[in-house]
Amino acid sequence: MAIVGVGGIADASHLPAVRALPGSAEAVAAVDLDLDRASTFAARWNIPAAYDSLPRMLRETRPDLVIVCTPPAAHREAITTALDAGASVWCEKPPALSLAEYDAIGAHEGAQGPFVSYVFQHRFGSAAQALRSRLADGTLGRPLVGVCHTLWYRDTAYYDVPWRGRWATEGGGPTMGHGIHQMDLMLWLLGDWSEVRATSGTLARQVETEDVSMAMVRFANGAMVSVVNSVLSPRETSYLRFDFTEATVELSHLYGYDNSDWTWTPAPHRADATAADLGAPTENEASSHTVQFRELLSSMRTGTRPGASGADGRRALELATAVYQSAATGGPVTPDMLTPDNPYYHAMSGRVRDTGTANEEPLHA
């Protein structure tokens, strides 16, 4: 594998994930626009080659897998270049700046691969896996009410990085860059949504995008969920709560969890039920890049599409699009509205200029 973009997330999460699975993958190259930075990173991780050109790296090393850790605006070019060279791709969130960009990227996949998948590691912890299984077998009954809150804190200095807080380079604010992890987990558990009503604001940070959004999401199964994404919350937490007919299941963590971060509470008519009765797992595997990376490698070996790719990887971006459109227009958004004739399909702001084109005119009236 090769890594493209050698900033903090590559150091903190991706290379540790590779090294946590010895014998499964070998890092052969690091790529960054700054060759000195790529070389320093390569030396630190004992990677044999460093490049400032992705096409050249692909020609010379021919990796099986490319891990993309660039800022969001550079995802599309890095992914499509790697796919066209025959390499599979694992890309950091957000997957793309828009649904249009996501779909354009997908056109570079082959019917049998290579595929691009995205970093949504919270799906892969043992508790989330167990909860999904219990939903499938009916142990917990029907989903009714939910909470999906990403309440984080990012100070003014965080936005000194030039690409942050801008529609054209980050794609959006905390709805895209922070809460998307919790929203993906919610969607993976509860399934398709049917309607979004949202509002957003820029309350405290000097950014183009929102710094807080709130939405009410209806699901096809009838459940209703409150979704809040914030970078203004001093006591940080990532909190998900799902109320089913048979139990409440809660997750309270920050950037990752293990079983101890989950609470399984029986409904009053099942007061004697234990967490194990409700489906809580005995195996304790934390959510992490390592666990998702292991699943990705398994898919590559069997030639199958990995999780968090294709239509499955698109769902969180669809929901983010609906949040932005509803917040901007003041009306409800349904999935059938997210089509190429919708300006929000092309840019989360609904403006052509935020797709990187020269046209400065809004796409909507």
Image (tube, helix red, strand yellow):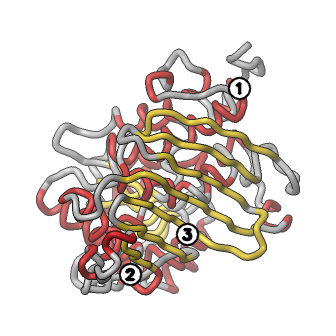
Q: Position of residue 256 (x, y in %)?
A: 49, 76
Q: Residue at x 61, y 22 (%)?
A: 343
Q: Which mark is residue 144?
A: none
Task: Please tell me which residue is depicted at 29% across the width and 53% down the height of the picture.
Answer: 87
Name the disc covering residue 6, or none.
3
Dot 2: what SS?
Answer: loop
Is residue 363 shown left or right of residue 334?
right
* Above or below: residue 359 compared with residue 28: above
Query: Where does the N terminus fall, quadrant-wise?
Result: bottom left
Residue drawn at 64 percent across, 54 percent down: 228
| Residue type, numbered disc 3 | Val
- Please report whichever mark, 2 or 3, sits nearer to the chain's N-terminal start: 3
**Amino acid bearing label 1:** Thr
Mark 1 or mark 3: which comes first in sequence? 3
Nearer mark to the viewer, of 1 and 2: 1
Q: Which residue is mark 2?
A: 286
First-in-chain label (1 vs 2): 2
Q: Position of 108 compared to 250: left or right? A: left
Name which residue lies at 58% across and 69% down.
238
From mark 1 to mark 3, how far is it between C-alphas?
A: 38 Å
Query: Quick one: 329 or 211, which is closer to the camera?
Result: 329
**Marks 1 and 2, how far apart in space?**
39 Å
Q: Tell me the amino acid under the disc marked 2.
A: Ala
Give the x, y percent position of residue 290: 36, 76
- Camera-side residue of 80 and 173: 173
